[in-house]
Image: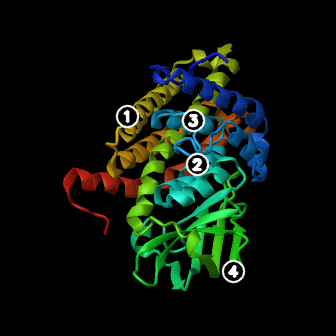
Amino acid sequence: MSFEPLISDFYGFESALTEQEKDLLMELRYYLETEIKPIVNDHWERAEFIAPAVKGLAALGMFGLPWAETQRFPNSAVFRGWTALELARVDASVATLVGVQNGLVMGSVAVAGSPEQRAEWLPKFASGELLGAFGLTEPLSGSDSAQGLRTTATPDGDSWILNGAKRWIGNGSISDVTIIWAKSTEDGQVKGFLVPTSTPGYSATRIEGKQSLRIVQNADIVLDGVVVPETHRLQNANSFRDTAAVLRLTRAEVAWAAVGNAVGAYEAAVKYAGERVQFGKPIAAHQLVQELLAKSLGNITSSIALVTQVSTMLDEGRQRDEHSALAKEFTTSRMRETVAWCRELFGGNGIVLENDVIRHFADAEAIYSYEGTREMNTLIVGRAITGHAAFV
């Protein structure tokens, strides 16, 4: 399969990937274009999960790319960013599925699990045998999870008893296992647990009425006396710092997904501009339409440059919280502008799903907020700039 760069990669950043990485990216692109794109609007409209995507993406090796136990071949954080962009270019919900499974769930096990837990659980998640969810956010605790976590874990012999509630948990109503983060009643520290969703006392209810990332099955979760064995406690999760280490790895890929969502809207706009005729010529020949496209491409290009560098820093072991925070804040803000300009180009036709822009427009709102709001990421960067924390 020949390598063909995206029209939105104006400066050719993709060309820096290795041949092996390019080959897999093309395999992913072909799969998404032929298997997912034809059905995505229908599933989005019905808020229905695309179940075959789990096996399809697992067969490509999309789950487990960063981890030695499950990676298809040695690869870079920059390449993994490109896969997030590619996924979101076709559908941000599918990108979220991979981000949750590959980054948040498997990342929790890889970062905070023991070698034995990594060997036991990572292959099961990588193969798609198990679908995971990541339970951190709570009804009363989102941005202040570091201090405001209310879910408790009480030691009881060789087990732990979990009580509390979680909200906005992606894959939460369909997962086989959920990573639950809870505060120990013994030492007050945050700990992580692998909780099979069939465990008595665990219940998940899908959140209805969602108008962004509709394919993602977000859930409210209740934990009522859920008993989890010590063997299911992530052995190296001893404080919120360990939770934050997982988020640090995934936040940069969310920034890549934001770029991908903007790219999807931009590509739809370029195609439509070439086909739609008004005043006797394609609207692509009108100055103000070209201005919208040029501004969109500028946002996309600057964002690709930023996320490429932040992922390079991750590969080199130099990435810090403020680097991924700036990437997430900047790219989601530019994404929001871009999808609005692209939807504007369509006029009234832009609100119809079949024209492939309104879905990206709506999905941008969720990407803008999850895994750290613009405000919280701005304050992380502000602290790095000034040396002063201004969170409260």
The circle drawn on residue 102 is 2
Q: Tell me the quarter of the picture where residue 91 sits.
A: top right
The location of residue 325, given as percent across then percent down, is 38, 49
The location of residue 226, given as percent across then percent down, is 64, 80
Q: Tell me the quarter of the picture where residue 188 sits.
A: bottom left
- C-alpha separation, residue under disc 2 versus residue under disc 3: 12 Å
The location of residue 149, given as percent across then percent down, is 46, 74
Disc 4 or 2, which lies upstream in sequence? 2
- C-alpha separation, residue under disc 1 versus residue under disc 3: 16 Å
Residue at the spot 42% in from the left edge and 36% down from the top edge: 307
Q: Which residue is mark 4?
A: 201
Residue at the spot 51% in from the left edge and 80% down from the top edge: 152
Residue 308 as seen in the image, left or right of residue 200: left
- Secondary structure of the residue carrying numbered label 2: helix
Residue 209 as seen in the image, left or right of residue 235: right
Q: Which residue is mark 3?
A: 83
> Within 10 Å of the Cα at label 1, are there few (<14), some (14-19), or many (20+) other Cα atoms?
some
Can I make out residue 373 in this image?
no
> Within 10 Å of the Cα at label 4, are there few (<14), some (14-19), or many (20+) other Cα atoms?
some
- C-alpha separation, residue under disc 4 versus residue under disc 1: 45 Å
The amino acid pointed to by label 4 is Gly
